[in-house]
Amino acid sequence: EVQLLESGGGLVQPGGSLRLSCAGSGFTFSNYAMTWVRQAPGKGLEWVSVITYTGGETYYTESVKGRFTISRDNSKNTVYLQMTSLRAEDTAVYYCAKNGAYGDCDYWGQGTLVAVSS
Amino acid sequence: DIQMTQSPSSLSATVGDRVTITCRASQTISNYLNWYQHKPGKAPKTLIYTASSLQSGVPSRFSGSGSGTEFTLTISSLQPEDFATYYCQQSYTTPRTFGQGTKLDIK
């Protein structure tokens, strides 16, 4: 059974940093791209970032470029999202998702809440 | 960026109804279109990928169609557990944008 477990969320002040982790199990982690998606309170789903299965390519939505960094450690079956210079508008539940063969998100974690507030 | 527009934004329906949600892309995305179901406090669930392929374990009352820029998600006979918000997403190029969502509630 595919499982994805996010951790690392919490309350942080504007301008602060946080690192999210997502541990995968039940599949060969190193064979799949991984994605982060977020949902701000009362808003819809927003695609944030994707990393290829080797970690060699990464892509971001414009609003987080230069502030967020996605990475992975295939020896630990874990993908990370390093978030810096956090803003109030980054407040959201952050989900990690395993990618299918067509760039779809075929399995999702339960999410971790990031709240940016003073 | 490719803009994804869903219609309607909200929809009221009754158990047993046939429901159709439309998703339009601002440029062609071939069949790189996915549909997700999301309930409050839960992980999103994948329903359809590549426009019409049913994700494993998803009931056959869900179906998808379309290509290019126009896509539809159809629920043939609504069940109580189907009341949720539905999102389309293009995976043709990054950023892999989502539609704004369609909230389906009980009439």
Image (cartoon, coloured by chain):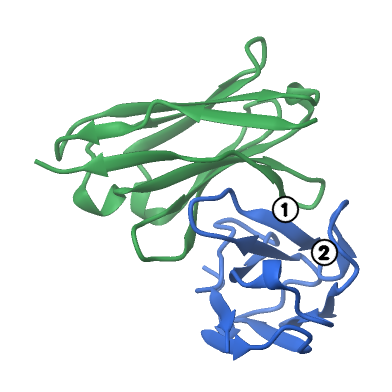
The answer to whether residue B67 of the structure is visible from this angle is: no
Chain (blue):
B
In this rendering, would B67 be left or right of A76? right
Quadrant of the rendered structure where residue B16 is?
bottom right
B18 is higher (above) or lower (below) than A70 = below
Q: Chain of mark 1?
A: A
Q: Which picture quadrant has residue A23?
A: top right
- Foreground pick, B93 / A85: A85
Per the image, the residue denoted by label 1 is: A104
Q: Secondary structure at mark 1?
A: loop
For the point 49% across and 40% down, the residue is: A111
Q: Colour of chain A?
A: green
Query: Residue B31 occupies which quadrant of the picture?
Result: bottom right
Residue located at (69% from left, 72% from top): B80
Residue B66 image offset from top left, x and y in percent:
82, 81
Up/down of A9 relative to B38, above or below: above
Q: Which residue is mark 2?
A: B50
Q: Position of residue A52 (x, y in %)?
A: 67, 35
Relative side of B7 to B61, left or right? left
Q: Secondary structure at mark 2?
A: loop
Q: On the same chain: label 1 and label 2?
A: no
Residue in the image at 59% along x and 56% along y? B94
Q: Are marks 1 and 2 in contact (CB under 8 Å)?
A: yes
| Residue A91 located left or right of residue B28 | left
Closer to us: A9 or A54 = A9
Q: Position of residue A63 (x, y in %)?
A: 35, 54
